[in-house]
Image (tube, rainbow, N blue to C red):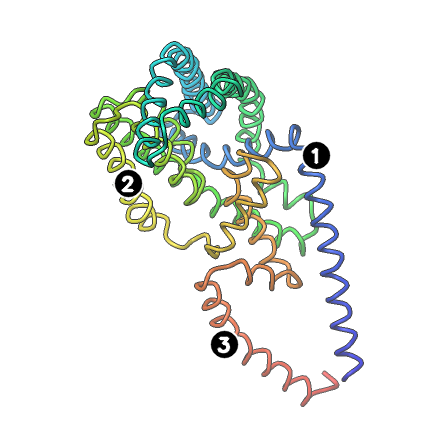
């Protein structure tokens, strides 16, 4: 018995060691091949979002190929429009930059006076930091860099959308391909893994897309009423950042508030209004509406979500932050279907998963004990 126990523990320890080495190697490969792998990953996850729209069009008796063309045309047009808006807004920001610079210096002078600093001291600080270190040029270059990077992203999206078209065309025959490609004993397990991934990730991304869209629209409308400059850009930014759990909404709120201070200083009411718009929209949608719709279907621990943001963000930068949750869900689902990796799925899961595992254990253990007793009583069967 002790030898068997030691062999079991040794085998499991070796397995986890090999799994850890494989994980490190996979991380290195994913980081170094991001330019190749990332567009394909984005295409797969985008296909999860768009497939329900394609199916909805099919229910209107529109052929699948035509439905895919309509959906892709809509997405491509939206991205092109967003690129035009960002490009024109970037040029407007550069043209209005002196006004924002002047307002910044006024705010700094007020803070310096509030702290009791002598005039020469804070004037010297402005000259040295703002002028000699070239912060003007750095901010201008950063604005141009963000605009150019987004335009480059739009160009890469052409390849991504091409991937999406073929994925959507192939997805209708995926189940049949799995059954033919693998043996009977493996095809069932692989099919269940794929179905779980498609169901959970597709549901999460679809809900997240429409929730983020609602967030962006409400933010844009609220800021437009307050006459905040570039309210449409802030709406688009809020839409994108809302895909990043917790951190995204905080970053969007901080950005809008700081910009409102820069625009409206020293008038406090518009600044407070912009802050309240971000607070109320993110609180109502993020803490009330989305949990009601999304529920706990993902089964991820909140701590694991934060760790996954760090890990995937390190691997793929901003895109990794956006993809962190769906990628972690995929890892969890795969671990759930591999007996030796099931402890990993439990560790990264939520408390609801613990209750589910305890329930399953309470159901299956008596059955396993009965089968074991029958074998002991009938050793020759």
Q: Which mark is nearer the camera, 3 or 2?
A: 2
Q: Is residue 19 above or below residue 121?
A: below
Q: Is residue 149 visible?
A: yes
Residue named by callout 3:
362
x, y percent for residue 343: 60, 64
- Which residue shows up at 53% across the image and 43% down it? 324
Residue 32: which numbered mark, if any?
1
Instruction: Answer with the quarter of the image where residue 77 lies.
Output: top left
Tell me which numbered mark, 2 or 1, is placed earlier along the sequence. 1
Give the answer, above or below, for where 22 lies relative to 219: below
Judging depth in this view, the residue of 65 and 239 nearest the camera is 239
User: Relative to 29, does residue 371 appear above or below in the rendering?
Assistant: below
Residue shown at 44% from the left, 13% from the top:
87
Picture quarter with the C terminus: bottom right
* Cα separation between marks 1 and 3: 45 Å
Residue 231 drawn at (x, y percent) = 30, 23
**Rendered image: mark on residue 297:** none
């Amino acid at each position: 018995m002790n030898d068997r126990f030691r062999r079991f523990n040794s085998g499991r320890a070796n397995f986890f060691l090999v799994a850890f080495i494989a994980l490190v190697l996979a991380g290195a490969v994913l980081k170094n091949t991001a330019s190749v792998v990332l567009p394909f990953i984005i295409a797969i996850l985008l296909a999860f979002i768009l497939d329900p729209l394609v199916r909805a069009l099919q229910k209107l008796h529109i052929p699948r190929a035509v439905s895919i063309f309509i959906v892709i045309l809509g997405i491509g047009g939206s991205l092109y429009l967003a690129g035009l808006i960002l490009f024109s807004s970037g040029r407007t920001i550069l043209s209005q930059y002196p006004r924002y610079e002047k307002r910044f210096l006024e705010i700094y002078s007020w803070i310096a006076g509030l702290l009791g600093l002598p005039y020469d001291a804070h004037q010297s600080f402005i000259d040295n930091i703002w002028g000699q270190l070239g912060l003007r040029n750095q901010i201008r270059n950063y604005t141009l860099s963000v605009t150019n990077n987004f335009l480059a992203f739009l160009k890469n999206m052409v390849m991504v959308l091409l991937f999406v078209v073929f994925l959507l065309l192939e997805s209708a025959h995926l189940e049949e391909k799995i059954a033919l490609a693998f043996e009977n004993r493996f095809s069932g397990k692989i099919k269940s893994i794929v179905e779980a991934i498609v169901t959970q990730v597709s549901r999460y991304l679809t809900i997240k897309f429409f929730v983020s869209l609602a967030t962006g629209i409400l933010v844009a409308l609220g800021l437009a009423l307050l006459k905040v400059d570039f309210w449409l850009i802030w709406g688009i930014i809020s839409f994108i950042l809302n895909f990043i759990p917790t951190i995204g909404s905080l970053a969007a709120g901080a950005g809008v508030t700081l910009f409102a201070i820069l625009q409206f200083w020293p008038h406090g009411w518009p600044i407070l209004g912009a802050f309240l718009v971000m607070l109320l929209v993110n609180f109502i949608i993020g803490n009330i509406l989305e949990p009601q719709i999304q529920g706990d279907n993902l089964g991820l621990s909140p701590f694991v979500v934060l760790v996954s943001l760090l890990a995937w963000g390190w691997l793929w930068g901003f895109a990794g932050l956006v993809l962190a949750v769906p990628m972690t869900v995929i890892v969890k689902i795969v671990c759930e279907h591999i007996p030796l990796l099931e402890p990993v799925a439990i560790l990264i899961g939520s408390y609801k998963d613990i209750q589910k595992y305890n329930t399953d254990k309470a159901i299956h253990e008596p059955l396993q004990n009965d089968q074991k007793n029958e074998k002991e009583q009938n050793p020759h069967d």
